[in-house]
Amino acid sequence: MTIIEIPAGWPADETSARVVQRELRGRLVHDEEGPAVGEGHVTGLDVAYDDERDLVAAAAVVLDARTLEVVEETTAVGRVSFPYVPGLLAFREIPTVLAALDRLATDPGLLVCDGYGLAHPRRFGLASHLGVLTGLPSLGVAKNPFTFTYEQPGSDRGDFSPLLADGEEVGRALRTQAGVKPVYVSVGHRISLANACAHTLRLTPRYRIPETTRHADSLCRRALKEALGEV
Protein backbone atom coordinates (compact mmCIF):
# COMPACT_ATOMS: atom_id res chain seq x y z
CA MET A 1 0.00 0.00 0.00
CA THR A 2 1.28 3.44 -0.96
CA ILE A 3 0.10 6.25 1.28
CA ILE A 4 -0.18 9.66 -0.38
CA GLU A 5 1.84 12.17 1.61
CA ILE A 6 0.81 15.78 2.11
CA PRO A 7 2.07 17.82 -0.88
CA ALA A 8 4.90 20.26 -0.34
CA GLY A 9 3.57 23.76 0.15
CA TRP A 10 0.06 22.59 1.10
CA PRO A 11 -1.63 25.11 3.45
CA ALA A 12 -0.97 24.16 7.06
CA ASP A 13 -3.11 26.70 8.91
CA GLU A 14 -6.40 28.53 8.62
CA THR A 15 -4.91 31.81 7.44
CA SER A 16 -2.98 30.34 4.52
CA ALA A 17 -5.89 28.08 3.54
CA ARG A 18 -8.27 31.04 3.39
CA VAL A 19 -5.84 32.88 1.10
CA VAL A 20 -5.78 29.89 -1.28
CA GLN A 21 -9.54 29.50 -1.07
CA ARG A 22 -10.09 33.17 -1.92
CA GLU A 23 -7.72 33.01 -4.90
CA LEU A 24 -9.28 29.85 -6.33
CA ARG A 25 -12.82 31.18 -5.82
CA GLY A 26 -11.99 33.92 -8.31
CA ARG A 27 -11.59 31.24 -11.00
CA LEU A 28 -15.09 29.79 -10.64
CA VAL A 29 -17.22 29.58 -13.80
CA HIS A 30 -20.96 29.83 -13.18
CA ASP A 31 -22.20 30.88 -16.62
CA GLU A 32 -22.06 27.47 -18.33
CA GLU A 33 -25.02 25.10 -18.60
CA GLY A 34 -22.86 22.01 -18.15
CA PRO A 35 -23.02 18.55 -19.75
CA ALA A 36 -26.30 17.11 -21.01
CA VAL A 37 -28.13 14.74 -18.69
CA GLY A 38 -27.67 11.09 -19.60
CA GLU A 39 -24.65 11.63 -21.84
CA GLY A 40 -20.98 10.81 -21.25
CA HIS A 41 -19.66 9.95 -17.81
CA VAL A 42 -20.44 11.02 -14.26
CA THR A 43 -17.94 10.37 -11.48
CA GLY A 44 -18.80 10.00 -7.83
CA LEU A 45 -16.28 11.07 -5.19
CA ASP A 46 -16.27 10.29 -1.50
CA VAL A 47 -13.86 9.83 1.41
CA ALA A 48 -13.60 7.85 4.64
CA TYR A 49 -11.42 8.80 7.62
CA ASP A 50 -9.48 7.03 10.34
CA ASP A 51 -8.66 9.85 12.73
CA GLU A 52 -6.60 7.71 15.08
CA ARG A 53 -4.09 6.92 12.34
CA ASP A 54 -4.57 10.25 10.54
CA LEU A 55 -5.55 8.53 7.29
CA VAL A 56 -8.15 9.32 4.63
CA ALA A 57 -9.26 7.00 1.83
CA ALA A 58 -10.75 8.48 -1.34
CA ALA A 59 -12.74 6.77 -4.06
CA ALA A 60 -13.57 7.84 -7.61
CA VAL A 61 -16.25 5.80 -9.38
CA VAL A 62 -17.06 6.51 -13.04
CA LEU A 63 -20.58 5.66 -14.21
CA ASP A 64 -22.06 5.62 -17.68
CA ALA A 65 -24.45 8.57 -17.48
CA ARG A 66 -27.09 6.78 -19.58
CA THR A 67 -27.13 3.31 -17.97
CA LEU A 68 -25.63 4.21 -14.55
CA GLU A 69 -23.38 1.17 -14.84
CA VAL A 70 -19.87 1.34 -13.36
CA VAL A 71 -17.21 2.02 -16.00
CA GLU A 72 -14.14 2.32 -13.78
CA GLU A 73 -13.25 2.81 -10.14
CA THR A 74 -10.08 3.83 -8.32
CA THR A 75 -8.98 4.57 -4.77
CA ALA A 76 -6.15 6.30 -2.95
CA VAL A 77 -5.14 6.45 0.71
CA GLY A 78 -3.35 9.46 2.13
CA ARG A 79 -2.46 11.41 5.21
CA VAL A 80 -5.10 13.83 6.46
CA SER A 81 -3.67 17.04 5.08
CA PHE A 82 -5.24 19.75 7.24
CA PRO A 83 -6.73 20.18 10.74
CA TYR A 84 -10.49 20.19 11.21
CA VAL A 85 -11.72 23.75 10.56
CA PRO A 86 -15.37 24.37 9.59
CA GLY A 87 -15.54 25.90 6.12
CA LEU A 88 -12.12 24.52 5.17
CA LEU A 89 -12.86 20.80 5.18
CA ALA A 90 -11.86 20.40 1.52
CA PHE A 91 -8.24 21.00 2.48
CA ARG A 92 -8.29 17.82 4.59
CA GLU A 93 -8.97 15.50 1.68
CA ILE A 94 -8.28 17.10 -1.69
CA PRO A 95 -4.74 15.69 -2.23
CA THR A 96 -6.05 12.14 -1.77
CA VAL A 97 -9.16 12.74 -3.89
CA LEU A 98 -6.98 14.15 -6.68
CA ALA A 99 -4.74 11.08 -6.44
CA ALA A 100 -7.77 8.82 -6.93
CA LEU A 101 -8.89 10.90 -9.92
CA ASP A 102 -5.40 10.82 -11.43
CA ARG A 103 -5.49 7.01 -11.42
CA LEU A 104 -8.50 6.90 -13.72
CA ALA A 105 -7.86 5.86 -17.31
CA THR A 106 -11.37 7.06 -18.24
CA ASP A 107 -12.55 10.63 -18.78
CA PRO A 108 -14.38 11.47 -15.50
CA GLY A 109 -16.90 13.77 -17.17
CA LEU A 110 -19.05 15.43 -14.51
CA LEU A 111 -17.82 15.27 -10.89
CA VAL A 112 -20.47 14.59 -8.25
CA CYS A 113 -19.29 15.27 -4.70
CA ASP A 114 -20.82 14.21 -1.42
CA GLY A 115 -20.83 17.75 -0.10
CA TYR A 116 -21.25 21.36 -1.14
CA GLY A 117 -20.24 23.78 -3.85
CA LEU A 118 -21.70 27.29 -3.79
CA ALA A 119 -23.71 26.35 -0.67
CA HIS A 120 -20.79 27.17 1.60
CA PRO A 121 -20.12 30.05 4.03
CA ARG A 122 -17.61 31.54 1.57
CA ARG A 123 -19.30 30.11 -1.54
CA PHE A 124 -16.48 27.65 -2.21
CA GLY A 125 -17.10 24.12 -0.95
CA LEU A 126 -15.45 20.87 -2.00
CA ALA A 127 -17.32 20.60 -5.32
CA SER A 128 -16.19 24.09 -6.33
CA HIS A 129 -12.63 23.48 -5.16
CA LEU A 130 -12.27 20.25 -7.13
CA GLY A 131 -13.96 21.75 -10.18
CA VAL A 132 -11.50 24.64 -10.32
CA LEU A 133 -8.44 22.43 -9.71
CA THR A 134 -9.43 19.86 -12.37
CA GLY A 135 -11.21 22.17 -14.81
CA LEU A 136 -14.13 19.71 -14.85
CA PRO A 137 -17.82 20.52 -14.37
CA SER A 138 -18.85 19.65 -10.83
CA LEU A 139 -21.75 19.69 -8.42
CA GLY A 140 -22.37 18.89 -4.78
CA VAL A 141 -25.16 16.73 -3.38
CA ALA A 142 -25.21 16.89 0.41
CA LYS A 143 -27.25 14.85 2.88
CA ASN A 144 -27.72 17.76 5.32
CA PRO A 145 -28.57 21.45 4.74
CA PHE A 146 -25.61 22.97 6.63
CA THR A 147 -26.63 26.37 8.00
CA PHE A 148 -28.87 27.62 5.20
CA THR A 149 -32.60 28.32 5.41
CA TYR A 150 -35.19 26.69 3.17
CA GLU A 151 -38.83 25.74 2.99
CA GLN A 152 -39.72 22.07 2.78
CA PRO A 153 -40.24 21.18 -0.89
CA GLY A 154 -43.38 19.38 -2.04
CA SER A 155 -43.62 15.67 -1.33
CA ASP A 156 -43.29 14.50 -4.96
CA ARG A 157 -40.08 13.41 -6.66
CA GLY A 158 -38.54 16.44 -8.39
CA ASP A 159 -40.08 19.03 -6.07
CA PHE A 160 -37.57 21.56 -4.75
CA SER A 161 -37.18 24.75 -2.76
CA PRO A 162 -34.28 27.25 -2.69
CA LEU A 163 -31.47 27.10 -0.15
CA LEU A 164 -31.03 30.69 0.95
CA ALA A 165 -28.14 32.62 2.47
CA ASP A 166 -28.92 36.30 3.13
CA GLY A 167 -31.59 36.13 0.44
CA GLU A 168 -29.27 34.57 -2.15
CA GLU A 169 -30.14 31.20 -3.67
CA VAL A 170 -27.03 29.05 -3.11
CA GLY A 171 -28.61 25.69 -3.87
CA ARG A 172 -31.83 23.70 -3.73
CA ALA A 173 -33.46 21.24 -1.38
CA LEU A 174 -34.47 18.56 -3.89
CA ARG A 175 -36.87 15.68 -3.32
CA THR A 176 -35.34 12.70 -5.12
CA GLN A 177 -37.92 10.17 -3.89
CA ALA A 178 -41.55 10.79 -3.00
CA GLY A 179 -42.13 11.08 0.72
CA VAL A 180 -38.40 10.87 1.55
CA LYS A 181 -36.42 13.79 2.99
CA PRO A 182 -34.63 15.90 0.36
CA VAL A 183 -30.99 16.18 -0.60
CA TYR A 184 -29.22 19.52 -0.94
CA VAL A 185 -27.84 20.32 -4.38
CA SER A 186 -25.43 23.13 -5.19
CA VAL A 187 -23.37 24.19 -8.17
CA GLY A 188 -19.67 23.45 -8.06
CA HIS A 189 -18.11 24.68 -11.32
CA ARG A 190 -19.16 24.97 -14.98
CA ILE A 191 -22.80 23.88 -14.52
CA SER A 192 -26.13 25.59 -13.87
CA LEU A 193 -28.21 24.88 -10.79
CA ALA A 194 -31.16 23.64 -12.85
CA ASN A 195 -28.88 21.22 -14.71
CA ALA A 196 -27.24 20.10 -11.46
CA CYS A 197 -30.68 19.19 -10.14
CA ALA A 198 -31.58 17.41 -13.36
CA HIS A 199 -28.40 15.31 -13.11
CA THR A 200 -29.17 14.55 -9.46
CA LEU A 201 -32.62 13.25 -10.38
CA ARG A 202 -31.13 11.11 -13.15
CA LEU A 203 -28.69 9.63 -10.62
CA THR A 204 -31.42 8.76 -8.09
CA PRO A 205 -33.78 6.34 -9.87
CA ARG A 206 -34.38 4.21 -6.76
CA TYR A 207 -32.79 5.79 -3.70
CA ARG A 208 -32.52 9.20 -2.04
CA ILE A 209 -28.75 9.40 -2.56
CA PRO A 210 -27.16 9.45 -6.06
CA GLU A 211 -25.78 6.20 -7.41
CA THR A 212 -22.43 7.95 -7.80
CA THR A 213 -22.26 8.64 -4.06
CA ARG A 214 -23.57 5.19 -3.10
CA HIS A 215 -20.81 3.47 -5.10
CA ALA A 216 -18.05 5.84 -3.96
CA ASP A 217 -19.08 5.64 -0.31
CA SER A 218 -18.93 1.84 -0.31
CA LEU A 219 -15.62 1.78 -2.17
CA CYS A 220 -13.76 4.30 0.01
CA ARG A 221 -14.86 2.46 3.16
CA ARG A 222 -13.51 -0.81 1.76
CA ALA A 223 -10.27 0.89 0.75
CA LEU A 224 -9.79 2.33 4.24
CA LYS A 225 -10.49 -1.04 5.86
CA GLU A 226 -7.94 -2.73 3.61
CA ALA A 227 -5.38 -0.01 4.28
CA LEU A 228 -5.80 -0.31 8.03
CA GLY A 229 -5.14 -4.02 7.76
CA GLU A 230 -1.73 -3.22 6.26
CA VAL A 231 -0.72 -0.39 8.62
Image: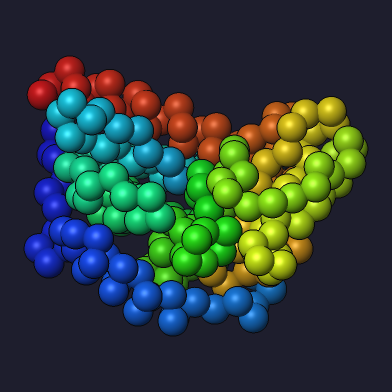
Q: Is residue 162 left or right of residue 63?
A: right
Q: Nearer the viewer, residue 131 or 102?
A: 131
Q: Nearer the viewer, residue 66 or 143?
A: 143
Occupied quadrant, residue 95 = bottom left
Residue furthest to the top in view is 229
Residue at 35% from the left image edge and 70% from the top image edge: 21
Residue at 59% from the left image edge and 39% from the top image edge: 144
Q: Nearer the viewer, residue 146 or 201?
A: 146
Whether residue 38 appears in this view of the structure is no
Q: Is residue 203 left or right of residue 147?
A: right
Picture quarter with the C terminus: top left
Name the colouring of the figure.
Answer: rainbow
The image shows residue 29 at horizontal and vertical percentages of 54, 78
Residue at 64% from the left image edge and 35% from the top image edge: 209
The image shows residue 218 at horizontal and vertical percentages of 45, 27
Q: Is residue 81 left or right of residue 163?
A: left
Above or below residue 45? Residue 197 is below
The image shows residue 6 at horizontal and vertical percentages of 14, 53
Picture quarter with the N terminus: top left
Whether residue 53 appears in this view of the structure is yes
Tally of numbered discs? 0
Occupied quadrant, residue 94 = bottom left
